Amino acid sequence: MLAKIGRRMLTVIPTIIGVVIVTFLLTRVLPGDPAIYFAGPAATPQSIADIRKSLGLDRPLPVQFVRYVEDLVHGDLGNSLSTGQPVVTELASRLPASAELTLLALAVAMAVAVPLGILAAVRQGSWIDHACRVIATAGVSLPVFFTGLLFVYVFYFLLGWAPAPIGRLDVFYAPPTDYTGFYLIDGLIDLDAETIWAALKQLFLPALTLAVFALAPIARMTRASMLALLTSDFVRTARASGLDNRTVILTYAFRNAMLPVITTLGMVFSFLLGANVLVEKVFAWPGVGSYAVEALIASDFAPVQGFVLTMAILYVVLNLAIDMLYGVIDPRVRLEG
Amino acid sequence: MKDAATIASPAPSVPAAAPASNSLWRHGRHVMAENPVTGIAFALFVLIALAALVGPHVVPYDPLASDVAAKLQPPSPAHWFGTDQLGRDIFSRVVTATRLDFIIAVTSVALVLAGGGLAGIAAGYFGGWTDRIVSRVADTIMAFPLFVLAMGIVAALGNTVTNIVIATAIINFPLYARVARAEANVRREAGFVLAARLSGNGELRILLTQILPNIMPIMMVQISLTMGYAILNAAGLSFIGLGVRPPTPEWGIMVAEGAANIISGEWWIALFPGAALMLAVFCFNLLGDGLRDLVDPQRRT
């Protein structure tokens, strides 16, 4: 088992190499002078020349690449121009905010989409099936920043249920003690119900926005794979053996139907990590996405490059985790290798 | 499953083109009649195309003219969609923006069709090193969250509309390359290809005159399915402030401009461009599903 996990982890290496090469190429080979990008909009010829020298841009490309990789290995993604801070520290301090939002959204999406998909498949052709189809088509057509704004209008302006979309906590609250950076978990550790409630209120709308977006592919996939399984031989046998409907659907069909759903999660994560940027902008969420957007607007290139690389590596690791999960759910994958 | 479907459906041969197009038309009407949603999507598509074509000439107001005296007005008979914070007519701006959004989506899809489609065909037909290189490039692009990669590309190439088009094309590359590769691979040893080879045609000629026309229907479906995604992607990039500069009317940037007013209750500034964007994407997605039914009846849902 361990050897197998090890072997699977090795297959990630070529992907990581590809990702690093692409992020390197993004800055060095494309038209334009990277020294000018890194120097920022207010640069003088002298400062550009200095930066070119300090970044080693006057050297041949392979030498530059080796240097870039060396810096990466030491955890150096360069410094942000606008704040002067190392990009790594800023990304690390903002990552929990993004992760908390994305994971909560994914949990909500799964909690709604999986039962919806199952019901749609079990009662094929009923109103719930049609609802599932409408949601699945609408979910992929809705621009996530637009849904976010609609929710703000309805839940904040019209109904007054949600707080103003300005970050992770209302200004009147102090953030909880920093253990993990996840406000909900930190609040739990301190047993601070008030902070948890305040953080949840702020999280509600952005998480809902992202969840609506992630719901569509999950519901569609659950429905399709449940439909395929409900007509399969072993489900027919189970029914013929007199097992009750609940056992047949939940134990026999559902566990097998989850496999393609888990696979879809990889694609869902790709969408979520991108949509996260837009949602963070709408809700002024202090995560890595809004950090990258601010840097983009200020033509501050190092944070953008660091952000792209971090997201790509995170995505590769998530896909790896999904593969492992697949092995846990499906014993056949585990045995055959 | 898709491969099996394409093997089963015989590839239309070139001489039979005239009766085939006639039966395709009848088949199309049949699909429309069976699925009215596709008909509605097609009507919507005609409307969008019309707006892109003549929109800028028929709008009631100049989309750039500001009128501070009439700013932030809710929808009224004079201003159907209301006015924004500079008093510009939102209806005129939404209609005018259709052309730019349409051009961005169409050019990026055309670009990726040429680049990704040809690379994929070559990979599927020749195999070997061509295949390995194309597949590796596609895998590497897929290793990134696509929107994030698009942000990085626009940041590196420079903040212009052209680069939004290029970035959108690049992130769609794996989709096109993979479909084209699979389709070309299936037809590599097909009878008509063998016949063409036997009559002395060069490999490149076979690729362009035999394989390419035969996989075009499948690629058309792919175009329609990715068109909506291309529009969403481009609008997302301009929403975060990339590419399109104000005061240019474009749906994504108009939603961004209206975002601040949502909190104070002026919903119309963001709603109408957002709804236009949503309708366009919805239309292309439905059209893609309908087109898939038309081209590949076995995969009909």
Image: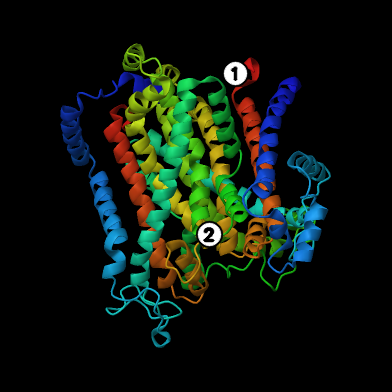
Q: Is residue B117 above or below residue B169?
A: above
Q: Position of residue A231 (x, y in %)?
A: 38, 23
Q: How many marks?
A: 2
Q: Name the residue nearer the viewer: B171 or B9.
A: B171
**Image quadrant for the C terminus of chain B?**
top left
Tell me what residue is drawn at x 48 percent, y 21 percent: B126
Chain name for mark 1: A
What is the three-letter code of the residue carrying label 1?
A: Arg
Q: What separation in Å lies between label 2 and label 1 (alpha carbons)?
A: 50 Å
Q: Where residue B73 sits in the image (x, y, percent)?
A: 38, 81
Q: Viewer-proximal residue, B255 or A64?
A: A64
At x 52%, y 34%, the residue is A261
Q: Around disc 2, counting alpha carbons within 10 Å, would you say few (fewer than 14), some (14 to 19), or many (20 or more)?
A: some
Task: Report which quarter residue A21 is drawn in.
Answer: top right
Element type at mark 1: helix
- Find residue A318 and report its image quarter: top right
Q: Residue at 34%, 33% (x, y): give it.
A: B216
Residue type at mark 2: give it: Thr
Against B226, is B136 above or below? above
Q: Residues within 10 Å of mark 1 (few under 14, many from 20)?
A: few
Query: Residue drawn 68% across and 51% down?
Result: A305
Residue topped by disc 2: B160
Tell me the number on the disc at residue A332. 1
Q: Quadrant of the N terminus of chain B?
A: top left
